[in-house]
Amino acid sequence: MATPQTSSSLFGLDALFDNPVFAGGIGLASLGAAAAFARRGAIVSLGAARRRLLVNVEISKQDPAYPWILAWLSQPRVATGFIASRITRIHNLSVTTRTTNSRVAGAEGPVNASFFLQPGYGRHVVKFGNAYIAVNREKHSTANMNTGEPHEIVQLTTLWAYRHTFEGIFAEAHTLAAKANEGKTVVYSARGMEWSPLGDSRKKRPLGSVILDVGVKESIVADVKDFLSRQQWYVDRGIPYRRGYLLYGPPGSGKSSFIQALAGELDFGVAMINLSEMGMTDDKLAYLLTKLPKRCLLLLEDADAAFVNRRHRDTDGYSGATVTFSGLLNALDGVAASEERIAFLTTNHIERLDPALIRPGRVDMMTRIGEATRYQAGHMWDRFYGDVDISSLGKEQFLRRLDELGLFGSNPDGTSSHRHTSTAAIQGLFLFNKSDMQGAIHMAEGLIPRNFEA
Ligand code: ADP
C-alpha cells in the first residue's frame, strides 16, 4: 500500500536537509537571526528601561537658569554645608574670559580680565547627595535667530528614584547665583534682540555717593518706593502698573549714577538702552520692552534721539535704523513683560522732547538734574575731605573760591553769572587731588567750562 508522502519529501527537501553543508548553513543563519533579534530586543527593552528608570531635565541656553547651572557645575569640590555632599568629576572645563577697558590710570598692560570656568561640551558625571547625575552639554548646529549664537543645552539625567534631586540642584544653583550677585547691580544691555548682562555685575553704588541738589534725590526715591508699595491699587483700578521718570540736564550731573545707585537701593538691576544707538529700530525697542528682565529699572538714555529722528523723517523721508518718536511712544505704551515697570528716560536736551511724552505711565515725574550747586559742592567736599578737614575751614575756602569764580550763577558783586560747573568736573578735581585739599582749592579755576574761559 502506498504510504502518503509529506510535501518535503515530495519536493526532495528531506534530501536537502540530509545534506550536512546545507543544514549547517541554516543552523548558522538561524543563530545569527536569533542574535540580531535578541540584540534588537535588548535595545528596545533598554530604551524602555531607560525611559522608565531614568529621568532627564533639559535646560536650554535661553533659560535664565542656564548660567546658574553651569556655575553650579563648576563649583570647587571642597565646600561647606550642602555643597560638601556633592562631588563633581568634571575634567573637561572651558573658560569664558571677560575683559573690561578700565585700566588703572596711566598704567600700561592688559585690560582687566576675569575668568569663568564652566563644564566643557560633552558628558560628565556629578554626584549630588546620593544621586549620580549624568551631565551632557551640547552645542547644536542650529542658531538662535535673535543673537546668531548656536543653540546650546545642558541635559541632566538621573535615576527615576532620585528625580527629586533636581529640585535640590536648582535651588542650590539659584542660591549660588543670588549669592554671586549679592551687593551687586546687574546691568543688562540689548544684544541683538535679547537682553544680556553687560560685563560682570557691578558693586552696588551707595545712594549717599550721588549728591543731587537739596531734596531732589529724596523725592524721587520716595516716589519710586511709594509706587512699589501700591501694586494692588493699580490692579484694582485696571491701570497698567508702570511709572516713568524723566531726568534731564547737562551731561556729567549724575543722572546715570543716580539711576544706578537707586537700582542698588531697591535691589533691582538696570536694563539699559541707548536710543541714539544705530541699529536700535522701533520694532527692536518694542520687542525688548516686552522681554524686560525681572526686577529691573528700564533706562532709556538719550531720549531726545527719537525726536531728532522724527524731524529727519518728516523733512526728508528718512526712517533710518534708529528709534523714532512714535516708535518710542508705542514701546512705552506696549505690553509690559514683568509685573511692574519703572522706566527712567534721560536727556541732555529737554527742549527737543515732545509734550506727548508727559503722560501717566510714560513720564509721570520730570526732574532737572542740573549744574553743581553750592550745596552739592559742599557735600562732595565732605565726602572727599571730611575726615581731614575736621573744622571745615578748607571747605569754606573752596566754596568761597567757587563764589569768586562765579560758578554758582552769581558774581561776588551780586550780578548774575552765566558760569556753571558740573558735579562730574568737581569729582574730577577732587580725584586729581585725592590727598591734597589745598591742591583742589588752588586748581579750582580749572572748573570753569572751556567756553567761559578768557
Ligand atoms: P550724567 O548721566 O548726568 O551724564 P554721570 O552719572 O554719568 O552723569 O556722571 C559722570 C561721572 O561724574 C560719574 O563718575 C559720577 O560718579 C560723577 N558724578 C556726576 N555727578 C555726580 C553727582 N551729582 N554726585 C556724585 N557723582 C557725580
Image (cartoon, grey):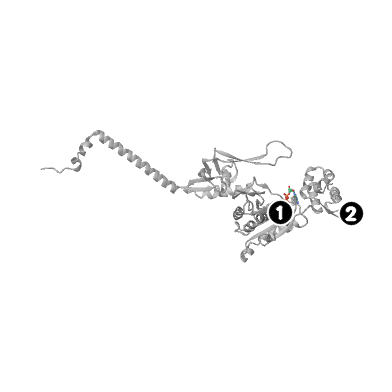
Given residues 138 and 302, the one toward you in this image is 302
Q: Considering only vertical position in the picture, is 241 above or below 61?
A: below
Residue 21 as seen in the image, left or right of residue 366? left
Given residues 351 and 357, the one toward you in this image is 351
Sequence-first disc among 2 and 1? 1
Given the image, on which type of amino acid does mark 1 rest? Thr
Q: Position of residue 125 (x, y in %)?
A: 51, 41
Given the image, on which type of amino acid does mark 2 rest? Asp
Residue 408 as seen in the image, left or right of residue 39? right
Given residues 81 and 247, the one toward you in this image is 247
Given residues 129 and 19, the one toward you in this image is 19
Q: Position of residue 154 (x, y in %)?
A: 53, 45
Q: How many marks?
A: 2
Q: Position of residue 183 (x, y in %)?
A: 67, 49
Q: Considering only vertical position in the picture, is 14 above or below 147?
A: above
Residue 360 as seen in the image, left or right of residue 59? right
Q: Which residue is mark 2?
A: 413
Q: Which residue is mark 1?
A: 347
Residue 293: tell me if it is visible.
no
Local secondary structure at mark 1: strand
Of the 4 image quadrants, the one containing the N terminus is: top left
